[in-house]
Amino acid sequence: MAHRPVSLLAPRGSVAADDLREGIDALLADHDGAVPLEFPADVLAAAEEAAGRDAAADGADRRDLTDVPFVTLDPASSTDLDQAMHLERTADGYRVLYAIADVPFFVDLEGVIDHEARRRGETLYLPDRRIPLHPEVLSEGVASLLPEQTAPAFVWELTLDERGEVVGIGLERALVCSVAKLAYDQVQQELDAGQGHPMMVLLQEIGVLRTALEAERGGASLNVPEQEVVAEEDHVRLTWRNMNPIEDANAQLSLMTGMAAATLMLEHGAGILRTMPPAEQRAVDRFRRQSRVLGVPWREGVEYGEFLRSLDWHEPTHLALLNLATSLFRGASYAAFTRPEQAPEVPVQAAIAAPYAHTTAPLRRLVDRFVLLVCLDHAQGRSPSQELLAALGEIPEAMQSTGAQAGNLERAARELVETAALVAWQGETFDATVIERREASEGNGSGAPLRVEVQLTDPPVTAWVPMDAEVGTVVRVRLETVDVTARRAVFVAAEGSSAAADGAPGGADGAGS
């Protein structure tokens, strides 16, 4: 009989899954009404009815591509699979077939599922659960591009030259069948061992070319580790996770498709763009001064994207700069237009350094469904319906309002997990990197003290500490108290580190705030 290792003690800093579940339940109760939790009965009934539709017999002009060996690439646990790819090398470059779940086939415009999706805006990912945009019978069932399941899809055909530039754009509706569900970590391990799936070898190659083109455009990607909640038996814990190279390549494929969608919409005068203004000059000047102070100067003539790509988050000063660089990436929004003259005067998304649209995640994000529909009309030489054009103008506001609600809930859930995990370390001292510094403020006698934001590696949290230290330096901080109910952890300067600001209370904002 096979045996497996047994641990009588959960790893330090882990949180019992039942306790986390109770905490998230309470948090959701506090947000009751602000974020839709359960689907109304009529929406569930409509989803069940829609799930029985036959895309092969719907009468639409849909191409049969079920003989093309598409594959998906996602986290191992994902079941709401929006994209599948088939990549080929050609005599002049590459041919990319990028299949995107045909959510509009199942979600009628102005129907009950559509209106419910507009209330939700996006799928929410919480530490122990997700709150989906669409009923799971669709998002994790018939509309998902699951392996060995014939499913309707929008298929982008992008022709690339030898440099990876897009020289041809096509879009049509089709039936597809994924032959394999690939997972990031496993794919990366195989590639590192020289045994990668042929499609993943090509994806890696295209990703390198697209990253080089991004650098030429002056685009930028922030290589900052992500906080991740990992489930282990009946406990969960926090860790830092850095993206695998193959994830970067996969992201480049999605960015390329979003840029192609923006090109179509701008050429034909109707659509929804994802926009971001250029960084304000004062923010650029401030960041350039910060880079000099930290001893990693951003030199004149070097695009900021190129500079950011040169930074390694493992280095404390580099990590601080990557966090400070977020000040250059602000003001993202959606811009809808139904006539050419309504298009934004500056349609460029500044971080990408090109016009861009969200189009590759319709199972998880509302706006993508409408971008796909309008792009299909453009690609097929049709004028979008008045019903679709009328809907375009409503989507940016829906995305903005639901995004704010989702962000508040996700932030509160993250703080809950952080403080629960920190209980095991209360009273201990840690090395931490200073990633931001704020001067003391005064107002009605209750201003904030001089404080710094620090990032810890283990446990993987950030926190504000009332002390003074230069950005990029490593300091010693002590975890003084933890209040899980209030989602607040208080760090203070440890003995031997920079002293707390004069007159400052011995506390700080909660971890991760």
Image (cartoon, grey):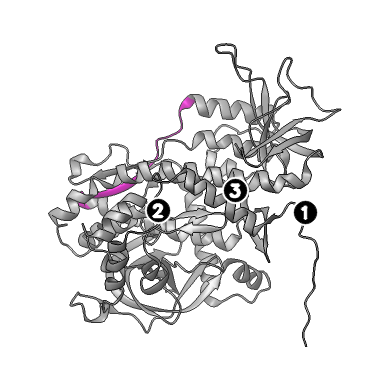
Q: Is residue 93 visible?
A: no
In which quadrant will I find the C terminus? top right
Task: Describe residue 264's horizontal placement relative to residue 504 as left or right.
Answer: left
Badge 3 element: loop
Circle 2: residue type: Glu
Q: Nearer the viewer, residue 113 or 196?
A: 113
Which residue is tagged 3? 223
Q: Which mark is residue 12?
A: 1
Residue 35 at x, y = what percent? 41, 48
Circle 1: residue type: Arg
Q: Is residue 410 magenta?
A: no
Q: Is residue 275 magenta?
A: yes
Please count the marks in the image.
3
Q: Are marks 1 and 2 in contact (CB under 8 Å)?
A: no
Circle 3: residue type: Asn
3D distance between C-alphas at marks 3 and 2: 24 Å
- The correct choice, above or below, for 470 with respect to 375 in the image is above
